[in-house]
Image (cartoon, rainbow, N blue to C red):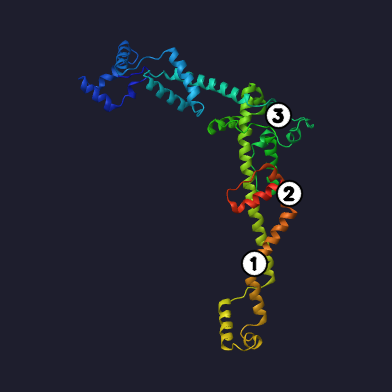
Amino acid sequence: MCVHRSCKPRDVPKPVLQHIAQQVNVTAQEFRNYSPHSRAAKYHRQQICQFCGFRSPTTQDAQNLQQWLSQTILPKCYDQPLLEQQAIQHLRELGIEPLSPSRLQRVVLAALRQHEREFCRAITAQLSTATRRKIDQLLTPSTGTTMPDEVGNLLEDLPLHRLAAEPSGAGLLHLFEEAEKLKLIRQLDLPLGLFANTSAKVVTQYRKRAATERQVELRRHPASGRYTLLSAFYWQRGQEITDNLVDILLQVIHKLGSKAEQRVTQQLTREFKRVEGKTQLLYRIARAALAAPDGSVREVIYPVAAPETLQSLVQELESNGTTYRQRVHKVLRRSYLYYYRRMLPQLLELLEFRSNNTTYQPIIDSLGICR
């Protein structure tokens, strides 16, 4: 009844067992005496497989399965349980009995090793000699002296473990730290399409391995494996740091505007006191003006609303209108000129700004001039 020798009696569902027992006119309890390792069981398996159109796997079938996994499945997924499921399904489609669990595991692991060797060689072949040299330099322990290479000055301040760290805040100094990280990664000159044909999940797995291993362990890898691990780390971190720069820029702009508004509000609060009952006051002024349209302001309006009250009302209304926005813009511009302006050269050097909206195209053009 069990097609595969690795099946056990408990693997057969009870409804199936009872149904077959009724067909052969025996009790279901007889199945307990059935040994899947006996000659009879082997003969029965052969008959069942022959009837269902399945055959026993050969050594060549295992080699073909390994090749199929390496070329078809592994470029998209490195999950071993999922690979085993895909292998079993592939053999079923070919009419071949599934391999034993231990043999299937060996085939999957061999396919993983084969694919990783081929993948690492393909990635390393895309790296220039200069790029490989710079990657090796970042794994060289710091001696406290300035290295002659262009990455040497940044090596002292930005070792590998700091490149993996996320920004701890959203201030100007944090923006500079992320900018230095991105400069270092871009100085490696990794090809833009290095992992273009590779699944993001696969790149992430290589990146995580590089991030968790110590530098001494990374140096022990074969050259192709070392370059692939570190290239995946730098390539993906470069994208993440670029996103971090944009996020920090947006937060800095928001913070700059919020602080300017708070400062202007505090200034205006000190300059005037809020006028209570503005609606009723305006009603009385309008009614007095309509009652004596030919009278003077001093004789008609001032008895209803004193000059000091009108002055406070004007200041309050101006604070909520154009005058308020102008003062906010003035404070914001002053903060930018004396402190935040330093971030502009860094951002223009590292980021490329684009817009499909024609309304904002003059701003994009002006950024191009600033470069």
- Closer to viewer: mark 3 or mark 1: 1
Q: Is residue 7 left or right of residue 83?
A: left
**Sequence-wise, which precedes: disc 1 or disc 2?**
1
Residue 39 occupies quadrant = top left
Q: Secondary structure at mark 1?
A: helix
- Closer to viewer: mark 1 or mark 2: 1
Location of the N terminus (image quadrant): top left
Residue 121 occupies quadrant = top right
| Residue 253 picture location, percent across and down | 65, 53
The amino acid sitting under disc 2 is Arg
| Residue 100 picture location, percent across and down | 41, 18
Instruction: Give me the disc on residue 134.
Output: 3
Residue at image mark 2: 342
Within-10-Å neighbours for mark 1: few <14, some 14–19, many 20+: few
Location of the C terminus (image quadrant): top right
Instruction: Give me the disc on residue 207.
Output: none
Mark pair 3, 1: CA separation: 55 Å
User: Residue at (53%, 32%) from the top-left corner?
Assistant: 199
Residue at image mark 1: 322
Mark pair 1, 2: CA separation: 29 Å
